[in-house]
Image (cartoon, grey):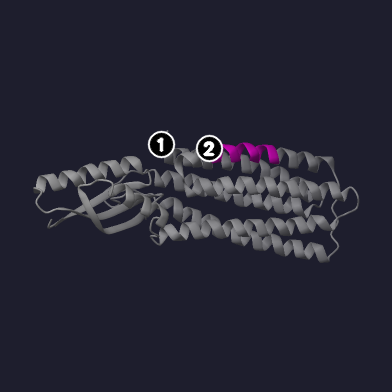
Amino acid sequence: MDGMKKVSQVGLYGVLGNIFLMLIKLISGIIFSSQAMIADGINSTMDIFASLMTLLGGKIAEKPRDRDHHFGHGKAEFLFSLFVSLSMFFGAIFIFKEAISGLFSGHRLEFSFLLILVCLTTIIVKGVLYFYSRKIYNETKSILVESSMLDHRNDMIVTTFTLISIILSRFQVSFFDSLTSMGIAILIFYSGIKIFLDSYAILMDHALEEKRVEEIKKYILRNKKIQGITKFETTPVGYQYLLILSILVDGNLSTYESHEIADNLEKKLIHKYPELLTVTIHVNPVKT
């Protein structure tokens, strides 16, 4: 299956799973007055939006090159992940505000074994979605899949604390419910910042990381026919990069021989480094 199709599939499974979890969380949270469970339900509502963005972003990003988009539609996934991060910011602020209000108003949670069952169901569903997303992320390195993967992981952590707050309410410890809701908001906000920064870096054409650049340069210079590198520039296209390269070769070589070196190098670089979409090499002759 194509990489972007797998990204869309992660989004589809996320939408279906999160709709189910949102309904049982919000209904049970309202019935038993659990702020943490309601916050968890709101978090699932944002998860539905995030999964929809993953689904739509993956669908657009998988479109092939066309006359108006010579390098494909790869940046769509970073644009949509930016939308996801912004929704996380607004959701986190709302949850935190409600938690503060509940903490100072003496809000009390009504204990129920049904709430415990909802928490355990959430942890199981999110665990399955997390491990599936992680598998696809290791294959595609898609930022949309990464955001879904982190979201599922965070939800397992969040719901575990919600479970603790429900158990504590059995012993008349109700304030932990509001504190858990505040913790959920902070975790959502932190995850949103990471996704925002990663998306922003790509949309602003952030170059390939320096460590990888040095690794590629060393690989190029292993070829004894290449005497130096005078230009090395990268720009992102989706989760891959364009590489523009200038190399120095013996000026006594024929034009055919010089370009044969460049052509072979292009093929080897694209084969060895999957993050490179295309490589353009300019040959500069030097006196020997």
Residue at horizontal 74 percent and vertical 46 percent from the top: 160
**Left or right, residue 161 beside residue 194:** right
Give the farthest residue toward the right.
171
**Left or right, residue 158 beside residue 278:** right
Other-residue count near label 1 (Cα within 10 Å), few / some / many at <14 / 14–19 / ≥20: few
**Quarter assignment of residue 19:** top right
Residue at horizontal 66 percent and vertical 38 percent from the top: 125
Which SS class for mark 2?
helix
Q: Is residue 22 magenta?
A: no
Region of the chain picked out in magenta, as a range: 123-134
Q: Tell which of 52 and 286 is nearer to you.
A: 286
Say which mark, if any, is on residue 225: none
Give the farthest residue toward the top.
1
Which SS class for mark 1?
loop
Kindly report the distance in space between the C-alpha atoms of the residues bearing marks 2 and 1. Answer: 14 Å
Q: Amino acid at mark 1?
A: Asp
Is any atom of residue 8 visible in this view? no
Residue 5 placed where, x, y %?
44, 38
Residue 15 placed where, x, y %?
57, 42
In the rendered image, which residue does mark 1 sit on? 2
**Left or right, residue 2 beside residue 117:** left
What secondary structure is the stretch in magenta mostly built from?
helix
In the rendered image, which residue does mark 2 sit on? 135
Q: Quadrant of the N terminus?
A: top left
